[in-house]
Amino acid sequence: SGCNCQPCQKLDAEASSQNVPEKEKIPSMESLLDRWAWGPQPSVYQLSQGILSLNHEQKLLCSEASNSTLSSTRLYYRLFILKRYFIALNRIPHSVEFENGYVARKSSIDPNDAKSINKCKNKLTTLDPAIGLARVGS
């Protein structure tokens, strides 16, 4: 992402570490066919490698086609935004009570005092999670 804040850097590091799994490289079917064109008949192992290669190429093509559709792209972006949204919500202190979109902070104010009621109303603020998203870096 384009954000350089500490939480975003941690998220980017986690995402890059998840994309590291290394598997053995499967040769392409085209190279296998070129080797078999003028050489001896392929062995059973070479034929099974050819089938694995064809399966691997088919999986890559299918995943590339499915990941490039508009609905999957939109879903990916929505999930990414929701992930950042919940990260922003987790930054709110746990001593806060949520009621109807408002945040009421606990305090020890005498309810009989008119000034204290006004202060309590002033402390009641609207919670806008989008502000937290700005802090996260979206």
Image (cartoon, rainbow, N blue to C red):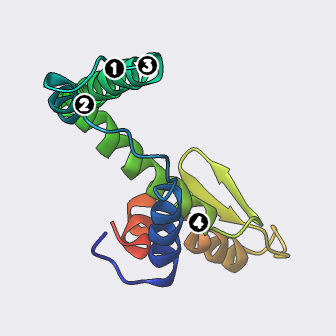
Q: Which residue is found at the position 21% from the left and 27% from the top?
A: 39
Task: Please say if the residues under marks 1 and 2 sit with CB atoms less than 8 Å apart.
Answer: yes
Q: Which residue is found at the position 49% from the left and 47% from the top?
A: 23
Please tell me whether mark 3 or mark 4 is closer to you in this view. 3
Q: x and y percent of residue 14 in the render?
A: 53, 65
Hey, what amino acid is under mark 4? Leu
Spatial separation of the CA atoms under disc 2 and disc 3: 11 Å
Dot 4: few (<14), some (14–19), or many (≥20) neighbours within 10 Å?
few
Q: Is residue 24 in view? A: yes
Residue that mark 2 sits on: 32
Q: Which residue is found at the position 44% from the left and 69% from the top?
A: 12
Spatial separation of the CA atoms under disc 1 and disc 4: 77 Å
Spatial separation of the CA atoms under disc 3 and disc 4: 68 Å
Residue that mark 3 sits on: 48
Q: Which element carries disc 4, helix, strand or loop?
A: loop
Question: Which of pointers 3 and 4 lies earlier in the amino acid sequence?
Answer: 3
Q: Is residue 69 left or right of residue 86?
A: left
- Label number found at residue 124: 4
Dot 1: few (<14), some (14–19), or many (≥20) neighbours within 10 Å?
some
Hey, what amino acid is under mark 3? Ser
